[in-house]
Amino acid sequence: MFIDKVVSQIQFEIRQIDRLIDMYRTLLMDCKDKEPDLVEITAMASVLHSFYNGLENIFAIIAKRIDERSLSGEQWHKKLLSEMAKKTQKRNMVISEVLKEKLVEYMGFRHFFRHSYSFILEWEELRRLILPLNEVWSEFKKELEEFLNGLNQDSGHSR
């Protein structure tokens, strides 16, 4: 069934992000008590990069499989995130506007990380994304679960 495949792909991404956060849990917790060194900052930046990539993978699955769209162009990352906070003819909104605004910061950091050198990373900038990471991830999973439950109940999406 179509919806089962979409849900399975999304659940795979959720497990990957859970694994990412779990594997770096000690590093992420230690940074609350002490200022990390360059290697730790670089590792945490990589975690943030991977975290948002995982979220974007989920959004891309929804855009491609449910919305039947693929985004392109210079601003496609921003457009994809914005579209996930909107209801369409084919689906309910995936995330709230409040969560979208939080994720804009992670998306911006991911872009910065891809186009910069790790030695220019500043802990104060990273800190504001690292410290609430678990909370943001929990909020994301809760909203995504509500979205997926709605998909499963909506027989209009079956193919």
Image (cartoon, helix red, strand yellow):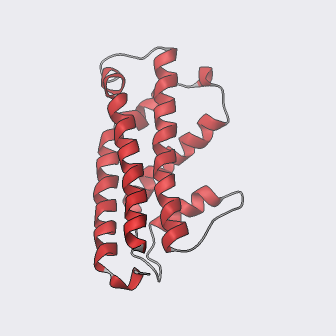
Out of 78 and 15, give the one closest to the viewer: 15
Say which residue appears at 35% left-offset and 27% top-offset.
Answer: 28
Say which residue appears at 44% left-offset and 81% top-offset.
Answer: 159
Judge whether 28 appears above or below 100 on screen. above
Image position of 62 (left or right of 30): right
Judge whether 96 appears above or below 21 on screen. below
Q: Is residue 85 visible?
A: yes
Total label count?
A: 0
Q: Position of residue 92 (x, y in %)?
A: 39, 75
Out of 119 and 21, give the one closest to the viewer: 21
- The quadrant in which the N terminus is found is bottom left
Q: Position of residue 60 (x, y in %)?
A: 53, 60
Say which residue appears at 37% left-offset and 63% top-offset.
Answer: 7
Out of 114 and 125, give the one closest to the viewer: 114
**Residue located farthest toward the front when viewing the structure as drawn:** 1
Q: Is residue 105 visible?
A: no
Image position of 29 (left or right of 112): left
Q: Position of residue 152 (x, y in %)?
A: 30, 74
- The quadrant holding residue 73 is bottom right
Say which residue appears at 52% left-offset and 16% top-offset.
Answer: 38
Judge whether 148 appears above or below 9 on screen. below
